[in-house]
Amino acid sequence: MSQDGSKTAGDEIVVIVDKDNNVVGSVTRSEMRSGGLIHRACYILVFNTEGDLFVQKRTLAKDIYPGHYDVTTGGVVQAGESYEETAKREIHEELGITGVPLKTLFDFYHEDSGNRVWGRAYMCVYDGEIILQEEEVESGGFHGVDEVLKWAEDKPFTPDGMYVLSKMLPS
């Protein structure tokens, strides 16, 4: 809880899964992070009709990859939520987008030094107004995929988001 009594992100109850993506329980987000527990998350690639990709810069307050650029919008699946419910909630919270069809792309397992996650990737096309969530998104805008890949050579990007984008690129 924060000082004013409201819940913080660390208080959220999140789904915990095993290596095969079977639900094994739920804990607070802070317990999941501190224990390095496998959890679920959704990842949404947001394109405009020109084919540009929305890239956001995460705030320094984020519990993982603070200050990194991210090619996806999304978040951790909370207890009682499906991947799709999480995707719709997150795209609305982070970017103010509602009512846009999400196309399911693929499920994947990603692991790096600070993150073990079963993800579900989505994409959508959106040309409307973007309203950034100040607590989580410092800035953002649409950019060509080639430009984003060039940026990623020397700027910090979230590794799980880049994995999702890499699966979408022609081989």
Image (tube, grey):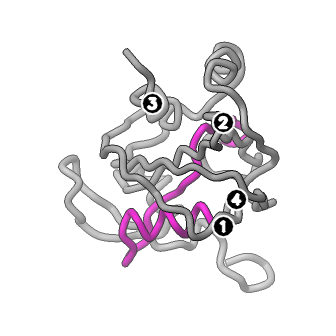
Measuring 22% from the left and 47% from the top, which residue is drawn there? 19
User: Which of pointers 2 and 4 lies earlier in the amino acid sequence?
Assistant: 2
Label 1: state its secondary structure: helix
98 or 116: which is nearer to us? 98
Residue of label 3: 163
Measuring 60% from the left and 61% from the top, which residue is drawn there? 91
Q: What amino acid is labelled 1 in the image?
A: Glu
Q: What amino acid is labelled 4 in the image?
A: Leu
Residue of label 4: 95
With respect to residue 151, does 88 lie above or below? below
Gap between marks 4 and 1 measured at Cα: 6 Å
Give coordinates of residue 86: x percent, y percent: 47, 66
Gap between marks 2 and 4 measured at Cα: 18 Å
Label 2: state its secondary structure: loop
CA neighbours of label 3 inside 10 A, class few (<14), some (14 to 19), many (20+): few
Gap between marks 1 and 3 measured at Cα: 23 Å
Residue of label 1: 93
Residue of label 2: 50
165 or 60: which is nearer to us? 165
Magenta residues?
66-92
Q: Quadrant of the N terminus?
A: bottom right
Q: What amino acid is labelled 3 in the image?
A: Tyr
User: Which of pointers 3 and 2 lies earlier in the amino acid sequence?
Assistant: 2
Gap between marks 4 and 3 measured at Cα: 21 Å
